[in-house]
Amino acid sequence: MIMKFKTKIDNFGRIVIPKKIRDEFGISKSSEIEINTTDNDEIIIKPGTSKPFIKNKDGVLVVCSEPVGPLEDILEGDREERIRKILRDIEI
């Protein structure tokens, strides 16, 4: 959905993202946003990815989120759990 709005910058340098856009992109009071500039003198504002969401990428549903901790720790914990399960299933 393409939307176009005009807004003004207030005395503190803030802009208001219109409610329709905030609702469309799931942006709430404490949401993080990403602000980038381009070589074409453009400012790009994107919703942050702090909340998990699902998007369709080439016909495949992809969950987009950030790890809840260091990735190495998560993988190690998962690996240890799988090893425990395998050893439980093997009768010695």
Image: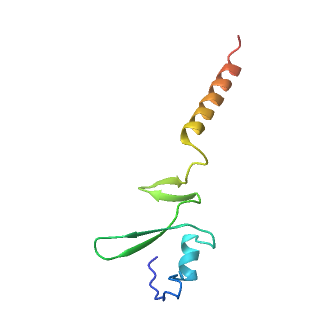
Which of these two is toward me, 4 or 77? 77
Residue most extreme to the left: 40
Residue 53: image x %, image y %? 56, 59
At 55% across and 41% down in the image, what residue appears? 71
Horizontal and vertical percent for residue 52?
58, 57
- In this picture, is 82 found above or below 30? above
Q: Is residue 5 above or below residue 79?
A: below
Number of numbered discs: 0
In percent of width and height, residue 3 lies at: 46, 81
Which color scheme does this rendered protein use? Answer: rainbow
**Left or right: where does residue 2 sit relative to residue 73?**
left
8 lies left or right of 28: left
Q: Nearer the viewer, residue 8 or 66?
A: 8
Residue depicted at 67% across the width and 26% down the height: 85
| Vertical placement of residue 84 versus 29, above or below | above
- Figure check: 92 above or below 53: above
| The residue positioned farthest toward the front in the image shown | 12
Residue depicted at 53% across the width and 60% down the height: 49
Q: Residue at x 53, y 78 (%)?
A: 21
Quadrant of the drawing holding the C terminus: top right
Point out residue 91 in the picture as x, y percentages from the top left corner: 71, 13
